[in-house]
Image (cartoon, rainbow, N blue to C red):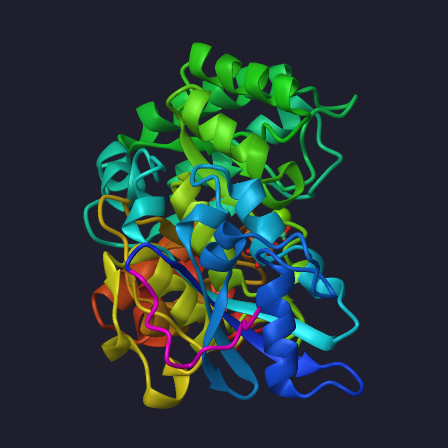
Amino acid sequence: MKFVDTSYEPGKDDLKVVFRIEPGHGTIFKEAASKIAKESSVGTWTTTDTINERAEKIKARVYELNDPYAKIAYPKELFELNNIPQIMSSIAGNIFGMKSVKNLRLVDLGMPEKILKEYKGPRYGIEGVREMLEVESRPLMGTIVKPKLGLDQKEHAKVAEKSWIGGCDIVKDDENLTSQPFNKFEDRLTETLESRDRAEDETGEKKVYMCNVTAPFNEMMERAEEIKKQGGRYMMIDVVTVGFSALQEMRDEGPELVIHAHRAMHGAITRKKEHGITMQALGQLYRLIGVDQLHIGTGVGKMEGEKNDIKWIKENISKKEVTEYDTTMEDMKKRLKQNWHQIKPVFPVSSGGLHPGIIHEIMDFLGKDLIIQAGGGVHGHPDGSKAGAKAMRQAIDAKMNKENPWKYSEEKEELKKALELWGTKPN
Ligand code: CAP
Ligand code: MG
């Protein structure tokens, strides 16, 4: 069976994948690409006399070779279209462990409408979240209660209340806070929603609490239902650690809450430029399944990730259509167009080492359709959480008014103190 056919024109129903390939010892690039197409579709390491006509018909084909990038087209018959685990067991399964590749990275996905139609996508999306929070154009601003762990439910709710009153639209749990003995899920939920209501009354602004439901599936579903019952509007899910299957069920069968996708553990898969899966490809899958908000990195904060890559992730999760005009000719070797049809856009979340001093830089390259979150950058303010939240809102207002943050801070005490402490450079 031949798996490389550069004359092959991918069919409109084919799933297209870009791989970056470093061949294993003794293997040339084209051969490695062929083995990837074979192992990720119908074949194995050797030819077998059991091959039938159908296998020949539905096999994957390498249709473009731009060393180190290869584009592979997968006929839809290879997949159970609404089954992400099965799709990933094909295009991101055994191939990562083959000896014929030294390193392999799944770079980009081009999904056909036939697959997109099988998924609901975000229930709210950017527009729905903006409507819920009644915030028309500026970035939304949130904080993460710190310390990550250690506060009890009452102390947690107090930090949340100060942050909302100071100006946060959003308060979220940290990724590893779920239901510990000192801070049980249901107690925290009740206390923090009461804080939210008091903060809404005091500020006249809509406030949301992103309570972390991450848990074994049945428990996670019960926690989400409890949020709904107590009048919450969001659930936060650590999407990588819970897995695609649980996330699909939470989106499709869970209560109608906004889904905030934290990506803890993604770095184990996405970080190495020569091996693994890009955050951008993962982001496309999370949009397909239907999270409403997704962490994409900052380009300037404490977590790794270059600005250009983060911008590309943002394009792919929040634009209606990504065309070849959104990138350079050079990049077209490793990028695919994507029309999202009926799938709503996902709100990009920028978080990790942020503080009021670098808000203008973040908004410069990621724009206003963004959720900006800061934990240390709010609670580390010299005058505490409420002042820190105020300083973040003032920094956003400065940018929205096209004002220099230092100049703007002359009249804004909280922002001034934050700039004096952290400056305007990434930490
Ligand atoms: C940020 C954060 C987030 C990171 C996750 C933390 O806190 O709560 O989990 O942003 O990284 O635990 O580090 P700070 P990413 O604001 O105090 O840094 O958004 O890249 O997934
Ligand atoms: Mg965190």
Whether residue 111 appears in this view of the structure is yes
Q: Which residue shows up at 32% across the image and 54% down it? A: 13
Of the 4 image quadrants, the one containing the N terminus is: bottom right
Magenta region, residue range: 1-11
Q: Main secondary structure of the magenta part?
A: loop
Of the 4 image quadrants, the one containing the C terminus is: bottom right
Asked if the stretch drawn in magenta spans residue 373, the answer is: no
Q: Nearer the viewer, residue 64 or 217?
A: 64
Judge from the rendering whether residue 74 lies leftward or rightward of residue 101; answer left or right: left
Q: Position of residue 209 (x, y in %)?
A: 46, 31
Judge from the rendering whether residue 71 lies leftward or rightward of residue 13; answer left or right: right
In this view, the residue farthest toward the front is 49
Q: Nearer the viewer, residue 246 or 318?
A: 246
Asked if the stretch drawn in magenta spans residue 10, the answer is: yes
Is residue 374 positioned above or below 28 on the image?
Answer: above
Q: Position of residue 168 (x, y in %)?
A: 41, 43
Is residue 359 positioned above or below 291 on the image?
Answer: below
Is residue 79 positioned above or below 98 on the image?
Answer: above
Q: Nearer the viewer, residue 426 or 225?
A: 225
Q: Which residue shows up at 64% across the image and 18% down it? A: 219
Q: Which residue shows up at 69% across the image and 39% down it? A: 176
Q: Position of residue 366 (x, y in %)?
A: 35, 67
Q: Position of residue 280 (x, y in %)?
A: 47, 63
In this view, the residue farthest toward the top is 229
Judge from the rendering whether residue 133 lies leftward or rightward of residue 414; answer left or right: left
